[in-house]
Image (tube, helix red, strand yellow):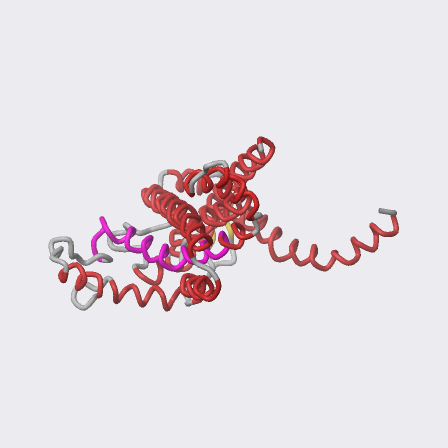
């Protein structure tokens, strides 16, 4: 590429780069700067406190609860959305075709098109201890001893939120993985079948390796979304009961807009950024090494 071509290319992408700089990177830098201050939205004065907000954050009892909840959400989402989604996509590719496959793909994808607020309200009724569908179903099959107020008990509230999210997003991940599987040449499956490989051997020897990049991307997105978890908790429990469903996003929100501790909220947001970037870098390095190994 000549110098003039490079200049023209830079000229074309300059508006996009400017928008990214102004709308993404400058706010990130400003948030990190504000994390070293104590300030209120109603007060013009900002007081420099250095690393004091970070010391408070690491001793905050709710931070440990939030991290555990985010990690639990990420772990379950990787297993269910990516792991089970890959198995479901492979089954759809093998045993469903034509209109049946299109119909099932639409059915699985449908929950992802529903607003998070609507989904949260819907599952609030599903989990209702008096009129909810879940307790009614358990009672109908003789498991009334398991019935409980799912969103009102600290031991079950977070798991109920996690279960709702799996219902909404597993089908979406499945649809994307199905596209990746259908790009694999049929000749590979036919050749391994002639060599005596069964469905399980084909799945682990062909499907998984040849969809590794899509799996890596979806895993990265899933973990990032888990660390940014917010809407589900706000709609269904608002961090309760007894702060058992606090996550990193709700801690930032409550400190900023409920407790008016803007500097401390900026500190929490910076920690979320650091954790998200760290996990993303580790996952990209791991994916690159696996690609080189192949």
The residue positioned 48% from the left and 38% from the top of the image is 51
Of the pair 225 and 30, the residue shown nearer to us: 225
Considering every residue shown, the one lying at the far top of the view is 293
> Residue 288's image quarter?
top right
The x, y position of residue 13, in whole percent, is 74, 56
The residue positioned 57% from the left and 45% from the top of the image is 187
Question: Is any atom of residue 294 visible in this view?
Answer: yes
The residue positioned 31% from the left and 52% from the top of the image is 245
Of the pair 109 and 70, the residue shown nearer to us: 109
Magenta stretch contains residue 173 = yes
> Residue 258's image quarter?
bottom left
Magenta stretch contains residue 38 = no
The x, y position of residue 147, in whole percent, is 15, 57
Of the pair 10 and 165, the residue shown nearer to us: 165
The x, y position of residue 157, in whole percent, is 26, 53
The residue positioned 38% from the left and 56% from the top of the image is 254
Of the pair 208 and 56, the residue shown nearer to us: 208
State which region is magenta.
Answer: 152-177
Please give the count of numbered marks on the rendered protein: 0
The x, y position of residue 277, in whole percent, is 53, 42
Question: Is any atom of residue 50 visible in this view?
Answer: no
Considering every residue shown, the one lying at the far front of the view is 194
> Residue 172's image quarter?
bottom left
Q: Is 282 located above or below residue 118 in the figure?
A: above
Q: Is 195 located above or below residue 255 in the figure?
A: above
Q: Is residue 47 left or right of residue 294?
A: left
Q: Is residue 153 left or right of residue 251?
A: left
Kindly report the secondary structure that dominates the magenta region of the rendered protein. helix
Q: Quadrant of the C terminus?
A: top right
């Amino acid at each position: 590429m000549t110098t003039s071509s490079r200049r023209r290319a830079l000229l074309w992408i300059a508006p996009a780069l400017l928008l990214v700089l102004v709308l993404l990177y400058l706010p990130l830098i400003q948030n990190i700067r504000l994390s070293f201050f104590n300030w209120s939205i109603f007060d013009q004065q900002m007081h420099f406190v250095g690393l004091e907000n970070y010391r408070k954050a690491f001793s905050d009892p709710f931070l440990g609860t939030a991290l555990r909840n985010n990690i639990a959400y990420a772990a379950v989402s990787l297993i269910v959305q990516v792991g089970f989604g890959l198995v479901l996509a492979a089954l759809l590719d093998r045993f469903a075709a034509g209109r049946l496959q299109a119909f099932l793909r639409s059915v699985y994808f449908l929950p992802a098109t529903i607003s998070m607020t609507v989904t949260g309200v819907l599952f609030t009724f599903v989990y209702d201890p008096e009129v909810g569908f879940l307790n009614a179903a358990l009672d109908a099959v003789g498991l009334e001893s398991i019935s409980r107020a799912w969103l009102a008990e600290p031991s079950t509230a977070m798991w109920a939120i996690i279960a709702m999210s799996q219902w909404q997003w597993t089908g979406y991940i499945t649809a994307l993985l199905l596209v990746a599987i259908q790009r694999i040449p049929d000749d590979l499956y036919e050749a391994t079948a002639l060599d005596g490989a069964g469905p399980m051997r084909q799945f682990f020897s062909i499907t998984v390796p040849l969809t590794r990049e899509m799996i890596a991307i979806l895993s990265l997105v899933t973990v990032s979304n888990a660390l940014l978890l917010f809407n589900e908790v706000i709609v269904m429990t608002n961090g309760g009961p007894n702060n058992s469903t606090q996550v990193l996003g709700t801690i930032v929100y409550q400190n900023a807009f409920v407790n008016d501790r803007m500097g401390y909220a900026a500190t929490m947001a910076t920690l979320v950024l650091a954790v998200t970037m760290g996990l993303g870098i580790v996952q990209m390095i791991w994916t690159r090494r696996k690609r080189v190994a192949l």
